[in-house]
Amino acid sequence: MIHQKLGSRGPEVSAIGLGCMGMSDLYGPADRGESIATVHAALDAGITLLDTGDFYGMGHNEMLINEALSGRDRSSVIISVKFGALRDLVGNWIGYDARPAAVKNFLAYSLRRLGTDYIDIYRPSRLDPSVPIEESIGAIAEMVKAGHVRYIGLSEVSADTIRRANAAYPISDLQIEYSLISRGIESEILPTCRELGIGITAYGVLSRGLISGHWSRARQGEHDFRAASPRFQGENLEVNLALVEKLRAIAENIGASVAQVAIAWVAAQGCDIVPLVGARRRDRLAEALGALNVKLSPDDLGAIAKALPPGSAAGERYPAAALAHLDSEKRRLRG
């Protein structure tokens, strides 16, 4: 496993991270035993970065990670936690809370569920429009000073917010969607992070399975939020699956799977970018790890750029209601 520093001030992490959300929430039923076995397989393969959120399964995901790490060396794992999303009794999203008091409350609960006395990277899941980002970051900084948090990250925020947050306390990384068909960060957000020495942990590198090479219309199941995602609906899905077939032809020429090429493309965009893969089964994890052995040549990258240029995907990456909460998208949406 290759390791790299996460930004200029962040921890050293594996070149690929494991996103654990799907083991508890939003992608339909998951097998608990297989999820834990997948975490174990990731750790055994040298993955050190585990990403979660306190609202994934409303605490379930943190408790799952606690169980999976039982008997393991805590110091060998980098746990990244997002906080602040509010949900009701049936799991609906009802807002965000990043007030200083809420920061400390959420953190206390996460530490208990994870069974640890510190979190490696702690980050607001979204910008709370009612709270200046400096106040939220300042509260986390107090927890850094107290030893309960080691690094501060951000998630899905704009370049302006990144600058303000970084001025309040050095930011290790920005977690944000980045894939062959989600490239909005390239114009302003990614250059800003690079200017400030902030790393990128890229989620959605397979666009929630859409560009994995395994997706078909028949796969949309009950309790799977992708059923409401614009890119998975109607004609949009047909357009996007046609893009996948173009990528499949390139992957076959390279001698890799579609998913491996998609992950390798993200990794090839810079040594400051760490792809997060949302595998919740060992076979999918093994496939994702194979991306580390895929070295894309200039000709490969040129073929991919021609087949899937920026803006080629049909549909937004989130439904309109969710998109409205993304500080990272507000400038584009206003434009």
Image (cartoon, rainbow, N blue to C red):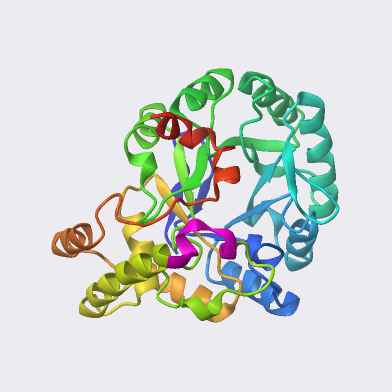
Q: Residue at x 57, y 78 (%)?
A: 282
In the image, taking residue 236 as reference, residue 170 lies left or right, namely right
Q: Is residue 227 magenta?
A: yes
On the question of residue 85 being in view, the answer is: no
On the question of residue 64 being in view, the answer is: yes
Of residue 254 and residue 43, the one placed in the foreground of this image is: 254
Q: Residue at x 45, y 43 (%)?
A: 200
Q: Residue at x 81, y 46 (%)?
A: 111
Residue 185 horizontal/vertical position (percent): 39, 40
In the rendered image, the quadrant that contains the C terminus is top left
Residue 272 in which image quadrant: top left
In the image, taking residue 35 as reference, residue 212 lies left or right, namely left
As displayed, is residue 78 above or below residue 22? above
Residue 50 horizontal/vertical position (percent): 61, 57
Q: What span is colored magenta in the figure?
A: 226-234
Residue 6 horizontal/vertical position (percent): 48, 43
Residue 280 horizontal/vertical position (percent): 61, 72
Residue farthest toward the left in the current orientation of the protein: 299
In the rendered image, the quadrant that contains the N terminus is bottom left
Q: Main secondary structure of the magenta part?
A: helix
